[in-house]
Amino acid sequence: MQLLSPAYAIFLLLGVLPVLIHLHGRRRAEIRKLPTLLLLKASNRRVAQRTKFRHILLLLLRMLLLMAIPFLLARPFAETDSDLPVQVSQTQRAVLIFDDSLSMMYQPAGDLKLGSTILLERGRKLATRIIDALPQGAEAALILGSRTAEAPVGQLTSDRTRLYSAISALRPSYRPSDLPSAFKRATQILSTQRGGLRRIYVIGDTSAHSLDGSLQPPAETEVSLVDVRDGKSLPNCAVVDLRAEPATSMGPRAVRVMAELGNFGDEPRRELQVTLLVDGQAVAKGLVDLAPRGQAIKRFIHILQPTPSPTQSPGQTEAQVAPSAGLHHLAVRLSPDALEADNERHLRVDVQAVLRVLVLDGDPRNLRRDDEAYYLETALRPSERDDSPLQLSTRSLDEGLGSLSEFDAVVLLNAKAQELSRRGIERGLSEYVRGGGGLMIGLGDNVEVEAYNRVLAELLPQPLAVVKTAGSLPSHPASEGESSTQGPGEHLGQLDRRHPLLQPFLTGRASESLLSATFARYLLLQPTPRSQGETTVLLSFESGAPALVERTVGRGRVLLFTSTLDRDWNDLPIQPAFLPLVQQVVRHLSRAPLQKAETETLIGQTRDIKLQAGDTRVEVTLPSGKTRLFERLQGRKLLSFTETREPGFYRVATAGDTGVLKARPSEHFAVNLDAAESDLQLAPASRLAALQRPLLQNDVSPSGKNPKRKVELWHALGWLLLVLLLGEALLLRQK
């Protein structure tokens, strides 16, 4: 044992002061025997013995009390073997890289060294001890070792209070580790000061995934790894991947959920419980066995129920009200273990929505195959199953427009402009589109260019020009007075590869089928100046003339197909690409595209939220229930959301001119953990040694002895002092 302030030790002599006072205060009166008191002497002998013992004990307490006060001021300490690097006590400039990644949430079982707290708590104690051990005047900085983390103390400072406060404020995060970036930042901080010894202390779990081969120690800087796990094995199980695919044999709303589970320990796991949750409710459970360092896939099949429409009345059934987008939050959860954060993984799944489509037939025929809407109806409903995702209604112009609010998309086929104007159909279509509906216009022999441009001026993406005859189909020879200017016909030549509607036609047979369609006639469009990107050409002919044009009108969309949607002007309806093209068009107009596998969003990654025309505010609800509000978004098409700090399901709501926030299910998304953080296997000893070169080993000092650390004893002496004071008070109360 040693003393930090040995000068106070001389005051230990005060311990004899109570003895001197006692001796000085002894009675000196002459003792005389009184006969009247001799009878009481025998009875008082036992009481006198107890009193004498109490006085002796009180004397000892006072001696210890006076000796404890200077001993406490001397601040005694003991030295024990230290697990800190030997070089901590040397003069230096230091940067502490504290790993606050997901793996530091690991909570080992009760252990004499690690205890039962999470690894981050032990890391904070070690970081505090490193700051304590730095010599007086040494400068240090504190940065974090997780991805995209901010530095608590980003500059070298000798202010110990600031460093202690930053360490005590450290909290675990769900972010993955990113030590290479942390090393670069530490090197930049140390480079601001020239001269002197520079060191980097990495306080973490020294897992192999964080100390991979890409991590190289900076030049002219010593690196020391401070292991919070003390070299112990940290077994763990996790859900490393989650996928879902349609289970068509069970119906259109059935999904097959596949969870990939991993065992990152050296012992097998038997009958590990796995739970499937849908929208927060447990719907299925199962057991799985995992071999040491092995993986397994657990499969579930579940029939998802469509989400009821917000307008559904309490008395209405599902069959009476069309379901909405049918978005569901799926999750798979494992039974708890030492790292619970990675025991659950999330997935966003859409039930195929039932879309209601209205076809306005401008040229109905008695013969079914000659009807304008025949090929379109066949493509939209290739089967007559009751659970078909499309509900199709066909009307002639004589039946009127009726209410369009119940339809997700409207297709207008080869209609006469005079009929549209006489029945007021063009006004109803304009109101429907501006309110958010989708309209597709197909042309034909009933189209008069000037009348169309006048009646549908508010809806047409571009004004019509003239009909161009490019050839004649084999089954439809050219009429008298018409000439074929380009041989047998024209083909499609250009596709907008960035547009989501055409994604299925970029490669393969679908692309070949679409480009092989022959067009004998189509309408040319008048050139117009670009109106701030509102008009987009999706398909073009080989000559460059537009074939499919899109325009945004209000909150809705209009698609113009410059040829017919039957076989009158082309043979596209008998091509294999016609069915997926028409279904893609309808779903695009309905804002319900066919869902493809969504790219997984991980913690810390940016998520792009698509905005619609008129959106002014966006509110994102985090899995914890907290919300983030973004305003003044007029004219923007994307919102880059960067606060993906929690795993779980994020919900998006938008507001337009009315200011009322409404849920946007199509933009909800799930965020998951980086599966690499689940593997806490210790890095090989060779890797640890390579990173710490040219430092000396942590466990041996230059003199060949183990490094020491101080254990201050004055805290215990303070408690002892309080106990002595309490004991003296109790003895004085006795009489």
Image (cartoon, helix red, strand yellow):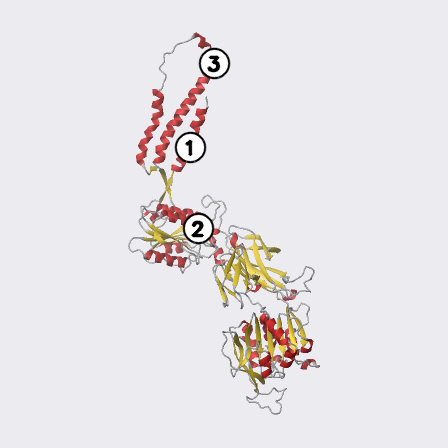
Mark 2 or mark 1: which comes first in sequence?
Answer: 2
* Residue nearest the observer in this picture, 288 or 318: 318
State the quadrant of the N terminus: top left
Instruction: Answer few, some or many: residues within 10 Å of disc 3's Cα (few below 14, many 20 plus, some between 14 and 19).
Output: few
> Is residue 134 in sight in this rendering?
yes
The answer to whether residue 464 is above or below residue 309 is below
Q: Dot 2 surroundings within 10 Å: few (below 14), some, or many (20 or more)? A: some
| First-in-chain label (2 vs 3) | 3
Along the viewing direction, whichever of 266 and 374 lies nearer the viewer: 374
Q: Residues within 10 Å of mark 1 (few under 14, many from 20)?
A: few
In this view of the protein, can residue 586 be seen by the observer? no
Image height of 129 relative to 146, above or below: above
Q: Amino acid at mark 1?
A: Leu
- Residue at the spot of label 2: 170
Q: Nearer the viewer, residue 191 or 368?
A: 368
Q: In x, y percent, where is residue 700?
A: 35, 47
Disc 2 or disc 3, which is closer to the eye? Answer: 2
Q: Are marks 2 and 3 in contact (CB under 8 Å)?
A: no
SS class of the residue under badge 2? Answer: loop
> Which one is nearer the viewer's eye here, 35 or 196?
35
Of the residues shown, which amino acid type is indicated by label 3? Ser
Residue type for callout 2: Leu
Q: Quadrant of the C terminus?
A: top left
Return the residue at label 3.
43
